[in-house]
Image (spheres, helix red, strand yellow):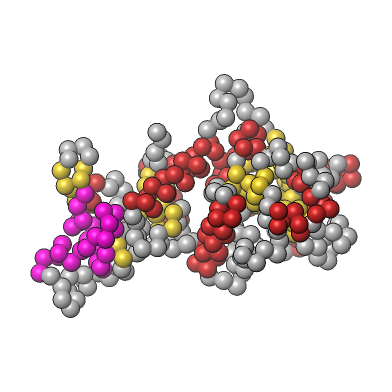
């Protein structure tokens, strides 16, 4: 069975249930004379009540190579206990481990930083849950039919700045920009109507960005068609939208986690998934007084399956006139394995009655 090449653990509130404060551990009221006696495990994977990263030297684990207890600090390959951004740390780890980020998993208590959220220390159950999630993501990179050439397919359009085009195609980074609103979470927003993509291209241009309409392609259509998808109604009270421009990063991360949990609980759709919704009409949108469809491709799927092809303005205008909606999202419900809850269908029955 495949396994992540890099399994990373945060320390505070993840490996142990406390904050690290150098010079304090083992010196507080009631502290034991032996430093290691101030460390308690509520579970084989959880240490509680420590307050220094020196605790790593006292936390022992069985080395499967010889069956003996080793200090955990001697069992890990990359010791990155340092006070700096996770982005900087993981870019460094990617460099010297020569691992693709898709082969890494990170356990962390902060919602905005994690691959797997830890709320009361890592337990065996949360560890296994995290590895299962990693397997589902990793499967996105395994071709459904390795003996046949992959089938690429156009799935929609997106208006993107040149910076974001580079991030999608070259850097393979997620769509995260705290200056702009992402109502359904940080992700690549895709439309089935090139005229809508052109509208958002022009929006970006007005903000001073060099931007173009892009075709959005998947590199393995069979994998794309089979992965989890769900179409949610726009005004779902139990799926609150993200207000990232007014929220902290942590609040934005918690919003995404709450949405993931609700979607799995109500409709059995596990991460990673693609989400669809209808967007309300607002002034300037090309379709007068009509809502439009949007698709949210979250980072792990984007990295594994998606690239974009930039269109010239002339080509964009030509397609807007001759074939603006080549693959309407609501006509792909069956072929793309989109879960369509009854409450979503009831929100716009005439629209969804046209679906395939």
Quadrant holding the N terminus = top left
Q: Residue at x 69, y 49 (%)?
A: 340
Of the pair 265 and 98, the residue shown nearer to us? 265
Can the viewer see residue 145? yes
Left or right position of 69 against 145: left
Left or right position of 349 against 263: right
Residue 185 colored in magenta in the image = no
Looking at the picture, does residue 307 appear above or below residue 29? above
Please provide percent x and percent y for residue 315. Answer: 82, 42
Quadrant holding the C terminus = top right
Residue 47 colored in magenta in the image = yes
Location of residue 288 (image quadrant): bottom right
Q: Residue at x 44, y 54 (%)?
A: 116
Left or right position of 20 against 236: left
Location of residue 263 (image quadrant): bottom right
Of the pair 349 and 104, the residue shown nearer to us? 349
Q: Residue at x 15, y 43 (%)?
A: 68
Please provide percent x and percent y for residue 308. Answer: 67, 42
Q: Which residues are magenta?
A: 33-61
Can the viewer see residue 180? no
Of the pair 304 and 140, the residue shown nearer to us? 140
Looking at the picture, does residue 63 appear above or below residue 278? above
Left or right position of 172 against 315: left
Please provide percent x and percent y for residue 23. Answer: 21, 71
Q: Residue at x 27, y 57 (%)?
A: 43
């Amino acid at each position: 069975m495949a396994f992540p090449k890099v399994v990373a653990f945060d320390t505070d509130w993840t490996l142990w249930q406390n904050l690290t404060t150098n010079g304090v551990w083992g010196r507080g009221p009631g502290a034991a004379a032996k430093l290691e006696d101030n460390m308690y495990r509520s579970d084989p994977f959880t240490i509680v009540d420590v307050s220094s990263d020196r605790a790593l030297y006292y936390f022992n684990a069985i080395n499967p190579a010889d069956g003996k207890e080793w200090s955990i600090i001697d069992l890990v390959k990359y010791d990155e206990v340092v006070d700096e951004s996770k982005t900087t740390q993981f870019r460094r780890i990617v460099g010297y481990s020569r691992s693709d980020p898709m082969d890494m998993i990170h356990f962390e208590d902060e919602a905005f930083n994690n691959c797997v959220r830890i709320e009361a220390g890592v337990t065996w159950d949360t560890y296994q849950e995290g590895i299962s999630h990693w397997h589902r993501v990793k499967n996105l990179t395994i071709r459904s039919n390795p003996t046949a050439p992959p089938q690429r397919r156009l799935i929609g359009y997106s208006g993107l700045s040149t910076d974001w085009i580079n991030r999608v195609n070259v850097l393979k980074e997620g769509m995260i920009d705290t200056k702009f609103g992402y109502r359904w979470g940080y992700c690549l927003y895709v439309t089935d109507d090139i005229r809508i993509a052109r509208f958002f291209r022009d929006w970006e241009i007005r903000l001073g960005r060099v931007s173009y309409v892009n075709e959005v392609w998947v590199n393995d259509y069979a994998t794309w068609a089979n992965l989890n998808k769900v179409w949610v109604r726009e005004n779902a009270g139990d799926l609150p939208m993200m207000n990232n421009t007014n929220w902290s990063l942590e609040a934005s991360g918690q919003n995404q986690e709450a949405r993931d949990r609700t979607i799995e609980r109500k409709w059995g759709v596990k991460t990673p998934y693609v989400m669809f919704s209808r967007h309300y009409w607002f002034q300037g949108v090309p379709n007068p007084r009509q809502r439009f469809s949007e698709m949210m491709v979250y980072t792990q799927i984007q990295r594994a399956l998606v690239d974009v092809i930039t269109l010239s303005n002339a080509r964009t205008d030509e397609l807007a006139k001759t074939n603006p909606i080549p693959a309407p999202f609501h006509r792909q419900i069956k072929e793309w394995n989109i879960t369509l809850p009854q409450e979503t269908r009831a929100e716009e029955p005439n629209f969804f009655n046209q679906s395939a």
